[in-house]
């Protein structure tokens, strides 16, 4: 039986404890390789580096540090370095939840999304705390999910986004398959001046609000459960597509 190749990335950087925990959880499932950013890359979304070259350093066997985004890491590994396509791509374990609208900003989710675009079964996994005290539950969930996807795969245009409560593993209430919830962001710009009188800005604000709606990822985490949300490549609003049929008639007015 062929040993599966498993590719790991994250957005917290190659030295993040969550990445080490993920590697530990999956190490005996196949050949596990890491291509991860050289530093913190949270909230870079699905960014790709087009205006500078990427540099890769193997800091220890199987661990490749890249001066780019999580998406860069996946493209570099799959299209530039590896001779064999991975059987599975996993992004995480992220410190901090990626729930609801967070997925549009998240480098963690983007790493798995890029894996999906490369037609490789992929999932992202996060723990709800930015200062994680319990990785064991996420490690166990990552392993269970990896085993399932290695055996069964995923539809070509779907990835999974998994969020795990920062609780001892024996206190997690179970697993819920959920829809994306919604956040209300309260961003503000904090303007400051440097010693030479120049202006610079920090994006800040209060912790985003969320709606605890039935069947959503927020509801699952609120109940102490793991949330598993399938995300699709196709973001078309098909109901609106039908309602906008009359727009075609505007062609005559161009």
Image (cartoon, rainbow, N blue to C red):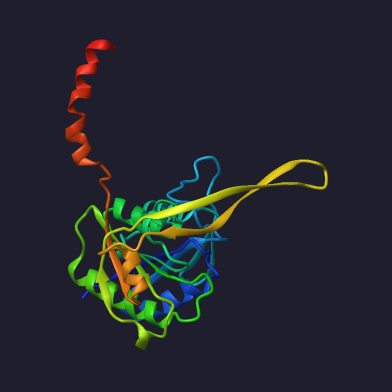
Q: Which quadrant of the figure contains the N terminus?
A: bottom left
Depth check: 47 or 185 in front?
185
Identified at 56% across, 60% down, the residue is: 40
Percent of width and height locating residue 9 = 43, 63
Percent of width and height locating residue 214 = 26, 64
Can residue 202 be seen in this snapshot?
yes
Q: How many marks?
A: 0
Identified at 34% across, 82% down, the residue is: 172
In the depicted structure, whether residue 124 falls above or below residue 253 = below
Percent of width and height locating residue 250 = 24, 17
In the depicted structure, whether residue 61 falls above or below residue 240 = below
Q: Which quadrant of the figure contains the C terminus?
A: top left
Depth check: 86 or 235 in front?
235
Q: Is residue 120 left or right of residue 164?
A: left
Q: Quadrant of residue 27?
A: bottom left
Q: Is residue 48 left or right of residue 202?
A: left
């Amino acid at each position: 039986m062929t040993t599966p190749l498993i590719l790991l990335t994250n957005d917290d950087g190659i030295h993040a404890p969550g990445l080490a925990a993920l590697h530990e959880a999956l190490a005996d499932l196949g050949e596990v390789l890491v291509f991860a950013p050289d530093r913190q890359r949270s909230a870079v979304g699905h960014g790709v580096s087009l205006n500078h070259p990427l540099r890769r350093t193997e800091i220890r066997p199987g661990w490749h540090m890249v001066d780019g985004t999580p998406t860069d890491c996946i493209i570099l590994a799959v299209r530039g370095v590896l001779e064999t396509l991975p059987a599975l791509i996993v992004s995480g374990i992220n410190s901090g939840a990626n729930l609801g609208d967070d997925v549009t900003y998240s480098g963690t989710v983007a790493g798995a999304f890029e894996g999906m675009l490369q037609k490789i079964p992929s999932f992202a996994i996060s723990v709800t705390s930015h200062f994680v005290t319990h990785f064991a539950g996420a490690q166990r969930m990552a392993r269970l999910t990896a085993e399932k996807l290695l055996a069964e795969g995923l539809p070509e245009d779907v990835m999974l986004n998994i969020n795990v409560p920062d609780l001892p593993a024996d206190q997690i209430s179970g697993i819920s398959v959920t829809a994306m919830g919604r956040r209300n962001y309260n961003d503000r710009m904090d303007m400051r001046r440097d010693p030479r009188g120049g202006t610079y800005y920090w994006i800040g604000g209060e912790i985003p609000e969320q709606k605890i709606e039935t069947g959503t990822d927020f509801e699952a985490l609120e109940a102490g459960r793991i949330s598993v949300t399938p995300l699709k490549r196709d973001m078309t609003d098909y109901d609106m597509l039908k309602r906008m049929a009359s727009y075609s008639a505007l062609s005559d007015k161009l």
